[in-house]
Amino acid sequence: MTRFAAPIAEQIWDMKYRLKQADGTPLDLSVEDSWRRIARALAKVEMDPAHWEERFYEALEDFKYLPAGRITAGAGTDRSVTLFNCFVMGTIPDNMGGIFDQLREAALTMQQGGGIGYDFSTIRPKGAPVTGVAADASGPLSFMDVWDAMCRTIMSAGSRRGAMMATMRCDHPDIEDFIGAKADSARLRMFNLSVLVTDAFMEAVKADGPWELVFDGVVYHTLPARDLWNRIMRATYDYAEPGVIFIDRINQANNLSYCETIAATNPCGEQPLPPYGACLLGSVNLARLVNDPFTGDAHLDEHALDELVSTAVRMMDNVVDASRFPLEEQRQEALNKRRIGLGVTGLADALLMVRLRYGTEEAARQTERWLHRIARAAYRASVQLAKEKGAFPLFDADAYLASGTMLGMDEDVRNAIRQHGIRNALVTSIAPTGTISLYAGNVSSGIEPVFAYAYTRKVLQKDGTRTEEEVVDYAVQMYRETFGTDAALPEYFVNAQTLAPLDHVRMQAAAQKWVDSSISKTINCPEDISFEDFKDVYLQAYETGCKGCTTYRPNDVTGSVLSVSEVEDVAPGEAPDQARGEGAQGAEVVYMSEPLDRPQTLEGATYKLKWPDSEHAIYLTINDIIVGGHRRPFEVFINSKNMEHFAWTVALTRMISAVFRRGGDVSFVVEELKAVFDPRGGAWVQGKYIPSILAAIGGVIERHLIATGFLEGEGMGLKSDPTAQVVNLDQPRGPACPNCGQYDMRMVEGCMTCASCGHSKCG
């Protein structure tokens, strides 16, 4: 039986990927059972299922190939969920009926667990006339608010909330409002935002020329292109959004440019997709393929890599046939093009094992060689599938070979495609792998550098005692096991805290040369980077061939990444105080090991809530538990004589109580409830407008938490919770994780990701 590399890896598997009955009884008794379940499910579509089940199992074994989380959690479960991570939805029509048809499709897709991307450039700008109703348009951002509210109310498959990407063209008349939308930290929280930047705009920026904002042939405004560029840069400098997508480059480099136009991406940006395009992801774990690590003979086993890539491509192609789809349009799009997104994880660890410093020119060259090898093997595998099962239906040899990645592909691969066709229109992509990387033993994520060499999780046990768990990077743990725990790390060990931003760009550009879709990557920037140097990061990304750019700089809106407290987390040769700031203390976070047990007797309070639309009052009972001398919420009961409310009040009672019993900063429950609005309208209660009955319930819970001392005041968050205690109060905190409540959210590959539980906004 496989031994997990760390407790957190087993916890991730148990929480996110292990198949269980409805009552929580495990059906996957070991991770081998999970691998067997996935292999069997994906082999069912084969002519010889038994043979391919064994081949697929071998690829999954020892975490060598990591299907995306949707596949790992959903394959072979008979659940009504999609195995595709996310989708770009249909083009939004510029009329009210069409807009709300698209909202409905978005809700259905998110209900099955798919994240979504939309281009809002097709909606007329604010103030434009609406013919026939003698009114002015409210503009695309007003409808984005509606999408945002919809997303808040839908819990995706498993425990994931849906993620969304919104794009807008750089020449849309409302682009300035779009750029500044995230200055309000409470607005559009469920969206990632990216500006679609054209080549013409970049040329106008360089030339300091004028730029027209246009819709439907009408010029609404003209401004200096450089002013608009500076506004984009200032926004992302100040609050990390919007990102930038070089949309002309994406369309020019697209293998399918002859039959589709792209205007949006999935939520994390690694899959630019056409309307109803589906995002199918998986990653080869390079950290598991290095022989003789940390020696002069260290090398990646390229023969094993070729074999693994070939099997992975076949598995992913089978997902297209095995998966459910929320919408028929999505199924047809997937079947017509069969695009997959095979990527990598553990790149930084693999570079460490072959003694290369991430970010150097040598490391970039090695990255380019490895990605070229993967692309070549993946295309050859897809050609073999075409010989056996047929090319994708929209394949046109001449048009295909004259576009995209094919123009630079090896001649033998081009000849094979011309002769036999190809099964999958696009094959490579580098996705966020935060959660599956933890599950695989805390290997470095995607093509990102190692975030931290080690950090300590403090876990509160049921009996009130605390234990510590060290979470160590995979390559660092291997180095310790080889040379001893006290051995100093060599100079080629580098992490995200000490890496120069342009080194990030160099690595992204090197990988992009052989990735036919795109790459999800975050370029970490120091808080004190100058604005001019910050802008240069984006210009370098454009000039070196990247398809987009996402940065993260600690800021007042999204907070700072929580500092790590272990000495091993600093760069070799750097003192801990230099790395964390003079006088800084390590941030201590205490986690719950298991949900709290219920004592025989609890103290609490009951509140009466009268909602204007309801004949009967709602009664809320909130009971508290004493932990470490502090009072904290433990359970909620919601009751009413109005039977119309019965089902959802029972569901809410169980869900909120389950969250409370997990510990941590549960104040996000209040925030989420208060943010829900009723499309039929809210009500005025005691002189204050409440947007929904759920928001009113959130307000009652908030008042109770303030009264018991758990919260400092309305909207103030955690006061004194011994199960999620941040000792380093002088250091700015980022947002609490919406899944476990801990202040351990980090920007990784364009997504805020929790290092504690693995929760990611993008999955």
Image (cartoon, helix red, strand yellow):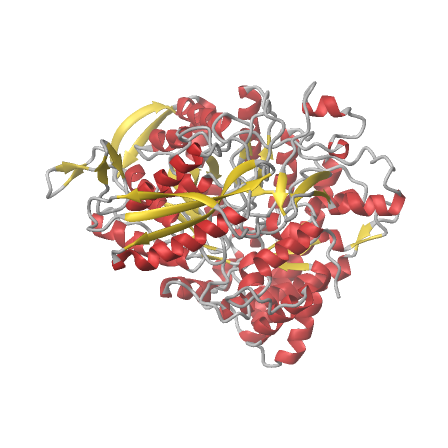
Q: Residue at x 75, y 44 (%)?
A: 351
Q: Is residue 503 above or below residue 474?
A: above
**Looking at the image, how many numbered discs can be counted on the residues?**
0
Return the residue nearer the eye: 633 or 300: 633
Q: Give the position of the N terminus as an image quadrant.
A: bottom right
User: Residue 439: image x %, image y %?
Assistant: 65, 54
Q: Residue at x 57, y 64 (%)?
A: 316
Q: Is residue 670 visible?
A: yes
Return the residue nearer the eye: 261 or 452: 452
Return the residue nearer the eye: 723 or 314: 723
Asked which quadrant contains residue 242, the reply is top left
Return the residue nearer the eye: 665 or 252: 665
Q: Residue at x 61, y 51 (%)?
A: 594
Q: Is residue 622 above or below residue 25?
A: above
Q: Is residue 336 above or below residue 501?
A: below
Q: Is residue 544 visible?
A: no
Q: Is residue 297 left or right of residue 210?
A: right
Q: Is residue 597 left or right of residue 119?
A: right
User: Residue 545: image x %, image y %?
Assistant: 57, 39
User: Residue 509: image x %, image y %?
Assistant: 61, 40
User: Residue 413: image x %, image y %?
Assistant: 63, 61
